[in-house]
């Protein structure tokens, strides 16, 4: 008898917004047929900015076209440019370095903490020179960077602190939300993020009124929103969509519940995986301060084999950042030839992410954990 086909648990779920399909369709119709015919940076965007600002207790929130654009706008508003250096993590997504390069500055790569997988403050401090203009730590997977230490460094050296919290919306550290530690922080709303949407978008979060003013101007070709076609600075086209503003405003009320479900799943994984370090699978700790639940990643000694084992048992997985940033062809020219980033290299070789989204069922979560544990225990027998 032929075995029944395995139903795969996807890593990127195709049905993220299925429960809100009718809301999205009605939003498209209402905005598309609205009398004002305003599709970007209208009253809906302003309302969304205010609602998110109030939920965070922030001074201002400025919506823009993506998380990458948000980083660019913050760097530009901070006066970063040619001749400046920005200290960034050696492990993470390309925009950490690309935004710095695109604004004319130089990324300087700091090695990471081997457990958090975020930039090591001590490594970052060792790289500060008279040319350093900003520190740009990033939260990674389900761990926030050591923002108290980075805040202290920025204050002591007189540097701007740009907090890449694109993946960490909903996380808190010492009672302060991710995105609120820096002179400015950013969130990304791309589909798979904790507050993802069916499109591109992001925001800048800041308590500094002048930074907010400049970001708001730069996102719309340097216009101030009062005098159209008067360009006070060379800006960008980084405007927010009115349909998505309505949709995200609607979804904001359910964010806490979705975050709680993500945390519940991640805690279950970490509890089940706590004993697996001797078996070649190192999991992040369960719960605790400074956690966010965008992606759940383990560090696996036999990553390719674990991934194949998961696939054979109907579990999709994903490898993020298979090379450290200074090892990428695009950024190698900015990396000293004699430098090394051993923790970043090890994270790139070992990280593997498991499905983590709110509508996973308990049975699916249990199956994923059982599958990882079954593989891990083969590691001990083979040794």
Image (spheres, grey):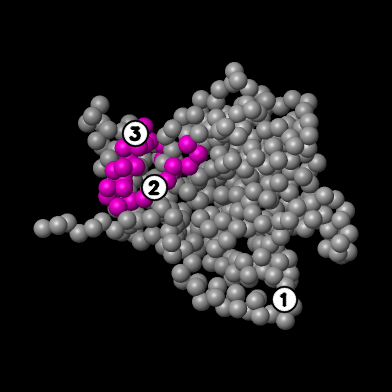
Q: Is residue 322 above or below residue 342?
A: below
Residue, disc 2: 317
Quadrant in the picture for the N terminus: bottom left
The answer to which image quadrant residue 364 occupies is bottom left
**Pick the front one: 330 or 213:** 330
Examine the structure image and report whether residue 206 is included in the region drawn in magenta.
no
Q: Position of residue 160 (x, y in %)?
A: 75, 39
Q: Position of residue 119 (x, y in %)?
A: 59, 34
- The answer to which of marks 1 and 3 sits earlier in the sequence is 1
Q: Position of residue 343 (x, y in %)?
A: 51, 28
Q: Secondary structure at mark 2?
A: loop
Identified at 43% across, 59% down, the residue is: 13
Disc 1 or disc 2, which is closer to the eye? 1
Quadrant in the picture for the C terminus: top left
Q: Is residue 49 above or below residue 172?
A: below
Q: Is residue 100 above or below residue 59?
A: above
Q: Secondary structure at mark 3?
A: loop
Residue, disc 3: 302
Residue, disc 1: 37
Which disc number belongs to residue 295?
none
Identified at 61% across, 32% down, the residue is: 331
Identified at 41% across, 41% down, the residue is: 352
Q: Is residue 86 visible?
A: yes
Start-end of magenta stretch: 297-322
**Circle 3 crowding by C-alpha within 10 Å: few under 14, some 14–19, many from 20:** some
């Amino acid at each position: 008898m032929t075995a029944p086909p395995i139903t795969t648990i996807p890593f990127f779920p195709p049905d993220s917004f299925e429960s809100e399909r009718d809301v999205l369709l009605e939003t498209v119709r209402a905005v598309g047929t609205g009398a004002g015919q305003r599709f970007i940076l209208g009253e809906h965007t302003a309302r969304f900015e205010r609602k998110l600002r109030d939920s965070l207790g922030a001074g201002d929130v400025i919506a823009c076209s993506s998380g990458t654009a948000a980083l660019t706008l913050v760097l530009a508003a901070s006066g970063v440019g040619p001749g400046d250096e920005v200290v960034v993590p050696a492990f993470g997504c390309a925009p950490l370095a690309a935004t710095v390069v695109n604004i004319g500055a130089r990324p300087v790569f700091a090695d990471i903490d081997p457990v958090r997988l975020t930039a090591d403050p001590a490594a970052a401090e060792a790289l500060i020179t008279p040319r350093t203009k900003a520190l740009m730590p990033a939260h990674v997977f389900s761990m926030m960077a050591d923002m108290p230490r980075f805040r202290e460094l920025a204050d002591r050296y007189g540097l701007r602190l740009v907090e890449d919290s694109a993946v960490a919306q909903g996380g808190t550290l010492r009672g302060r939300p991710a995105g609120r530690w820096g002179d400015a922080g950013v969130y990304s709303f791309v589909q798979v993020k904790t507050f993802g949407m069916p499109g591109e978008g992001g925001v800048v979060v800041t308590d500094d009124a002048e930074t907010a003013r400049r970001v708001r101007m730069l996102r719309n070709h340097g216009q101030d929103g009062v005098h159209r076609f008067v360009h006070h600075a060379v800006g960008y086209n980084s405007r927010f969509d009115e349909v998505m503003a309505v949709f995200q405003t609607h979804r904001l009320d359910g964010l806490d519940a979705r975050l709680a479900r993500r945390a519940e799943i991640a805690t279950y994984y970490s509890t089940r995986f706590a004993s697996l370090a001797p078996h070649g699978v190192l999991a992040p700790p369960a719960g605790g301060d400074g956690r966010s639940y965008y992606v759940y990643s383990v560090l696996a000694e036999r990553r390719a084999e674990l991934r194949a084992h998961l696939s054979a048992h109907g579990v999709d997985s994903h490898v993020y950042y298979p090379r450290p940033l200074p090892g990428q062809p695009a950024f190698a020219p900015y990396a000293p030839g004699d430098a090394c980033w051993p923790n970043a290299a090890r994270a790139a070789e070992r990280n593997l992410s498991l499905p983590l989204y709110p509508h996973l069922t308990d049975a699916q979560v249990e199956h994923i954990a059982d599958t990882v544990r079954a593989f891990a225990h083969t590691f001990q027998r083979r040794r």
